[in-house]
Amino acid sequence: MSEEKIIHQFKKNANETVMVKFSEFKGKRLIDIRAYYTAENGDLKPTPKGISISRDLIPELKLAVDKAMAAWERALPGVPGDSEPVRGDG
């Protein structure tokens, strides 16, 4: 698998798009979840903000997202997420 395949993408904010893709690094197949910005020429370019994981870690990632959603609902029941991302220290 030498070609990347986009699985899903969505707008993160006015300047960035998040893409979920199959990728390969050093012969290892990965799922890459990465923020992309729109360059002056209109092309989407990757940022360093992202994660690449092997298939066997996808259940752990899903569990983490499910826990985050449940924690959100407990802390802010019925409150939808903001359209702007929450910024951390990192």
Image: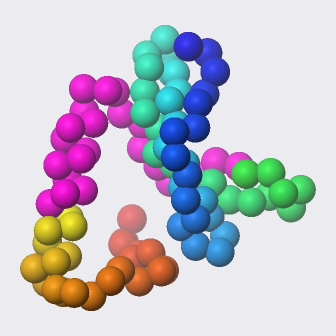
Bounds of the magenta segment = 45-67
List the single residue furthest toward the left.
Answer: 74
In this image, 34 relative to 88: left or right? right
| Number of on-image labels | 0
Q: Residue at x 44, y 20 (%)?
A: 29
Residue 81: within the magenta? no
Counting from the top left corner in percent of width and height, residue 23 is at 53, 27
Rendered view: 54 above or below 72: above
Which quadrant of the structure image shows residue 39? bottom right
Taking the image as shown, residue 78 lies to the left or right of residue 74, namely right
Residue found farthest to the front? 78
Q: Name which quarter of the figure residue 38 lies in.
A: bottom right
Say above or below: 10 vs 19: below
Q: Which percent across, then down, holds residue 77?
A: 16, 86
Quarter of the image with the N terminus in it: top right
Q: Residue furthest right?
A: 41
Q: Is residue 48 visible?
A: no
Q: Residue at x 22, y 87 (%)?
A: 78
Taking 66 as reference, is 20 left or right? right
Residue 69 image point, x, y percent: 21, 67
Residue 4 appears in the figure: yes
Q: Position of residue 22 (x, y in %)?
A: 50, 30
In the displayed structure, would residue 4 be above or below residue 28? below
Left or right placement of residue 63 versus residue 49 in this view: left
At x 48%, y 80%, the residue is 84
86, 4: nearer the viewer: 4
Depth check: give the residue in front, 62 or 89.
62
Give the quadrant of the C terminus: bottom left
Identity of the residue drawn at 36% across and 33% down:
53
The verdict on residue 57 being magenta is yes
The image's colouring method is: rainbow
